[in-house]
Amino acid sequence: MRIEQGAKRVRAYLGGQAVADTLRPVLVWENPYYPAYYVPVTDVRTDLLTDYGRTKHWPSRGNAHLFDVTVGDRTAVDAAWRFEESPVEELRGLVRLDWDAMDAWFEEDEEVYTHPRSPYTRIDILASSRTVRVELDGVVLAESHSPRLLFETGLPVRYYLPKTDVRLDLLDAGGRVTHCPYKGSAEHLSARVGGETRPEIAWSYRTPLPESQKITGLVAFYNEKVDLYVDGVLQDRPHTKFG
């Protein structure tokens, strides 16, 4: 478990009120992919917390006291955790608020979605003249000579293709929308190939966040689920949590 002092102002809101407002957030990597925010107890509205005596144990952090967070007629059950007797001394004076239980989170004055941004994740989006072809069971789903390549720390290269180079007649909106704190909201697409529907083969950002505007309206396919050729060379399918 990694712990690091953050430098951003961080606020968490529930029912229109700031439950936490801090200039001293602590980033705690509870998993290897992204951190969670822990907030000094002095920067939390403790008058909104109710302790019903519930606890939970984590091997790495010890026992946590679980608190309900109540604002008006809204109650988020077990949404605040305190590790007052944690074997990790840095956690003892902090409160962890459940990200999904809050209505909104802000880093400075910008709303953040899904999870805190990691200071060690970088995204580069580069125009390319490589030829990218996407196939599934021998059916060509897309072929482009003007892809945008998205390089994101810890993930495979993603190839974003103009819709004019994609067989949109074979793709359908899958109904599921996911959120990325670096790129925004993505609409997932399924493919119809050989009489079968393959769910969540691709995705597209209609209105990405400002730092990812270069991929607006483009389509990317999961390298993990399709046969992807770059300049005629078949790429290995990576093994990731998206496979």
Image: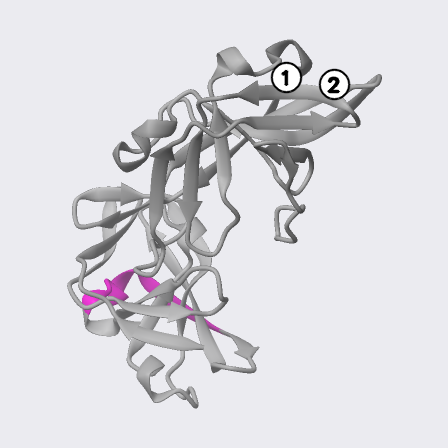
Q: Secondary structure at mark 1?
A: strand
Q: Residue 53: give x, y in percent of width and height.
A: 48, 75
**Mark before the other along the chain sequence, 1 or 2:** 1
Classify 10 Å Cα crowding around label 1: few (below 14), some (14-19), many (20 and above).
Answer: some
Viewer-proximal residue among 121 and 9:
121
How far apart marks 1 and 2 lie (CA) works out to: 8 Å
The residue depicted at 40 percent of the width and 52 percent of the height is 115
Identify which amino acid the numbered label 2 is placed on: Arg
Quadrant (top left/top right/bottom left/bottom right) for the N terminus:
bottom left
Q: Are marks 1 and 2 in contact (CB under 8 Å)?
A: yes
The answer to whether 187 is drawn above or below residue 68 in the figure is above
Image quadrant in which you'd find residue 103: top left
Identify which amino acid the numbered label 1 is placed on: Asp
Image quadrant in which you'd find residue 150: top left
Relative to 138, is 212 on the left or the right?
left
The residue depicted at 43 percent of the width and 60 percent of the height is 34
Q: Residue 86: give x, y in percent of width and height.
A: 42, 86
| Colour pattern of the rendering | one colour
Image quadrant in which you'd find residue 206: top left
Segment tinted magenta in the rendering: 43-53
Classify 10 Å Cα crowding around label 2: few (below 14), some (14-19), many (20 and above).
Answer: some
Say which residue label 1 marks: 172
Relative to 26, is 139 on the left or the right?
right
Say which residue label 2 marks: 192
Viewer-proximal residue among 180 and 16:
180
